[in-house]
Image: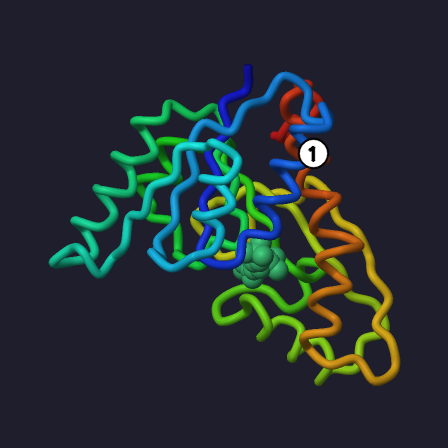
Amino acid sequence: MLRVLVCVSGGGTNLQAIIDAGARGELGDTGIVRVISNNPNAYALERAKNAGIDAVCVSPKEFANRADFHKALLDAINEAKPDLIVLAGFLVVVPEEVIAAYRNRIINIHPSLIPSFCGTGYYGLKVHEAALARGVKVSGATVHFVDEGTDTGPIILQKAVEVKEGDTPKVLQQRIMEEAEWKIMPEAIRLIAEGKVKIGE
Ligand code: GAR
């Protein structure tokens, strides 16, 4: 079984899409072994508990400094012995020690077609505000491996979504979630579980 650990910060609709795909038998031999949130109020924690998944909060506010937070995060990850870490709306910059310990075993969902509207400062609604301000006619979502950069790792899957006249950032965000994110994130996990994703040299 591919042991999947999901990191979240907010509403957890991507987490829900993964849980639901697993329940429908679409993720191959996969199990979500733990959900970690940096935010104690994240609704994603409730979604995990409702699905009977071990859910823990590791909040930076509980620690005297960033280094202690990073160590606690790595400990909470290591405890679950994951084969794959999925960042599903995790709004914390992943510490280098975590990236080094789980190289090529961390994936992220980003709500645009990378390399557009990504990198430092582009997260959540800000991505869609920037896309609308630029006037793009197509946006979408990307699942990629996580490396030391921000949204710079190898791309696994992308799906384009139409931008419509009169879209607000929230309307566009919702369409991209429904038409792209909730599909390509479970799909990427299934491909990894089936051994179909390889990183080239
Ligand atoms: C999603 O749209 C995800 O793509 C985005 O945060 C949202 C989380 O929603 N992630 C980023 O912006 C990462 N840079 P959710 O908690 O409902 O899954």
Q: Quadrant of residue 24?
A: top right
Badge 1 density bin: few <14, some 14–19, many ≥20, Cα 10 Å: some
Q: Position of residue 11 (x, y in %)?
A: 53, 58
Give the residue at mark 1.
21
Looking at the image, is 61 positioned above or below residue 78? Answer: below
* Amino acid type at mark 1: Ala
Q: Is residue 114 left or right of residue 49?
A: right
Q: Nearer the viewer, residue 136 or 184?
A: 184
Q: Quadrant of residue 80?
A: top left
The residue shown at (51%, 45%) is 47
Quarter holding the C terminus is top right
The residue shown at (61%, 48%) is 14
Q: Nearer the viewer, residue 109 or 40?
A: 40
Q: Quadrant of residue 107?
A: top right
Q: Position of residue 58 (x, y in %)?
A: 28, 48
Looking at the image, is 182 positioned above or below residue 79? Answer: below
Looking at the image, is 72 positioned above or below residue 110? Answer: above
Quarter holding the N terminus is top right
The residue shown at (56%, 67%) is 124
Q: Position of residue 117 (x, y in %)?
A: 64, 69
Looking at the image, is 71 positioned above or below residue 167? Answer: above
Q: Quadrant of ligand 1?
A: bottom right
